[in-house]
Image: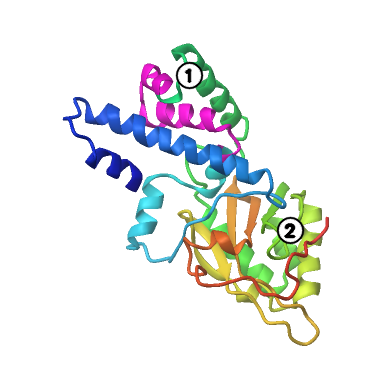
C-alpha cells in the first residue's frame, strides 16, 4: 500500500478514474509480490504456510476486528496460497471485490476470456476443499478448541480423540529453523500418536505452556516455548491455528518459523538453538 501511495503522490496529472487506477496499481503490486513469494518457496524447507495474525482475546482489539471483518481465517488463507498468483488475483478481484473481468484482464495483461478462465479454475480449487473453507465459521469452534487445549494439557487422550475429525491433518511450517512435522500428518490415529511423541520429547508440561489467542480471528494458541529440563528437550516458540468443521477439529497448523512471528506476541522471539533444524519424521 505504501508503494501504491508513493506512485499516486508522484503523478503529475489528475487521475481521471481513481478507483480503476488504484485497483490496477495495487493488484499489479500484489501480483508481483505473489510471484516473488512463489519463487522463494521453491527453496523452502518443508511445508510453507501463510504468516498468521495473532491477537488477544479482547473483543475490542482493533487488529482482531479488522481480521474478522476481512474474513481472513487461517484455513482460507492456506487454500488461497495454493492457487497460482494469476488465479488468486482473478478470483479475489472478481469474486471478492466484484471487479469486472475487463478490468481484471487489464491488471493481468491478458484477455477477458482468459481472466474468466483463471477465476473459474480458482473457484473450483477453492470449492473442492469444503473442510477448510465454508461460508461461516463453525459455531462450536471456541468450545471445541477450548476443550481440546484443556484435554491436551491434562493428558486426557480419550477426550482429545473424541474431538478430532477422523481425517484431521497436522501440518507444520518451520523452514528448517525449528522442529516440526516434515510432512502433513493425516488421520486421527496418526495425529494422536504424533501428539504422544511430542509429550515424550518435550515433557508433560508441553501443552500447559500454550496461551489461548485469536489466530486470524479464530481461537487458537501460541507458546513462547519451553526450556529443556529433566531430560526433556527444549521446545521452540510456535503458533497453533485450528480449523473446526461440524464440531470436530479437522486441521491443526503448527507455525514454528520465527520469520512468521511478526504479527504475533512472539515477534521478538527466536527459535531455541537446541534441536535447531531437526524435524519430527512421520
Q: Residue at x 66, y 74 (%)?
A: 272
Q: Is residue 240 inside the magenta stretch? A: no
Answer left or right for 42 relative to 34: right
The foreground one among 205 and 20 is 20
> Which stretch is magenta?
80-106
Quarter holding residue 159: bottom right
Q: Main secondary structure of the magenta part?
A: helix
What label sits on residue 115 in the rendered view?
1
Answer left or right for 128 relative to 2: right
What label sits on residue 161 in the rendered view?
2
**Mark closer to the chain start, 2 or 1:** 1
Q: Secondary structure at mark 2?
A: helix
Q: Residue at x 49, y 49 (%)?
A: 139
Residue 265: % across, % down: 48, 69
Q: Secondary structure at mark 1?
A: helix
Relative to 34, is 200 above or below? below
Q: Judge whether residue 132 can be spotted in this image.
A: no
Amino acid at each position: 500500500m505504501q508503494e501504491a501511495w508513493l506512485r499516486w503522490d508522484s503523478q503529475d496529472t489528475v487521475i481521471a478514474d481513481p478507483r480503476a487506477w488504484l485497483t490496477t496499481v495495487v493488484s499489479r503490486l500484489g501480483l508481483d509480490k505473489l510471484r516473488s513469494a512463489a519463487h522463494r518457496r521453491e527453496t523452502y524447507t518443508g511445508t510453507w504456510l501463510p504468516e498468521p495474525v495473532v491477537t488477544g482475546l479482547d473483543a475490542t482489539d482493533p487488529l482482531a476486528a479488522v481480521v474478522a471483518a476481512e474474513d481472513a481465517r487461517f484455513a482460507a488463507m492456506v487454500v488461497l496460497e495454493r492457487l497460482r498468483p494469476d488465479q488468486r488475483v482473478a478470483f479475489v478481484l472478481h469474486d471478492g471485490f466484484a471487479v469486472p473481468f475487463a478490468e481484471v484482464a487489464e491488471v493481468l495483461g491478458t484477455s477477458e476470456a482468459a481472466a474468466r478462465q483463471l477465476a473459474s479454475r480458482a473457484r473450483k480449487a477453492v470449492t473442492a476443499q469444503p473442510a477448510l473453507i465454508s461460508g461461516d465459521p463453525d459455531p462450536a469452534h471456541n468450545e471445541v478448541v477450548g476443550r481440546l487445549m484443556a484435554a491436551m494439557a491434562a493428558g486426557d487422550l480419550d477426550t482429545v480423540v473424541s474431538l478430532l475429525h477422523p481425517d484431521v491433518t497436522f501440518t507444520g511450517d518451520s523452514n528448517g529453523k525449528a522442529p516440526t512435522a516434515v510432512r502433513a500428518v493425516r488421520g486421527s490415529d496418526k495425529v494422536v500418536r504424533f501428539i504422544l511423541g511430542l509429550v515424550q520429547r518435550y515433557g508433560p508440561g508441553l501443552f500447559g505452556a500454550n496461551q489461548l489467542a485469536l489466530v486470524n480471528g479464530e481461537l487458537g494458541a501460541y507458546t513462547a516455548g519451553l526450556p529443556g529440563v529433566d531430560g526433556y528437550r527444549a521446545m521452540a516458540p510456535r503458533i497453533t491455528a485450528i480449523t473446526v468443521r461440524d464440531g470436530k477439529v479437522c486441521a491443526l497448523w503448527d507455525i514454528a518459523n520465527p520469520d512468521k512471528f511478526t504479527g504475533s506476541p512472539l515477534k521478538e522471539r527466536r527459535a531455541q538453538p537446541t534441536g535447531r533444524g531437526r524435524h519430527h519424521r512421520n
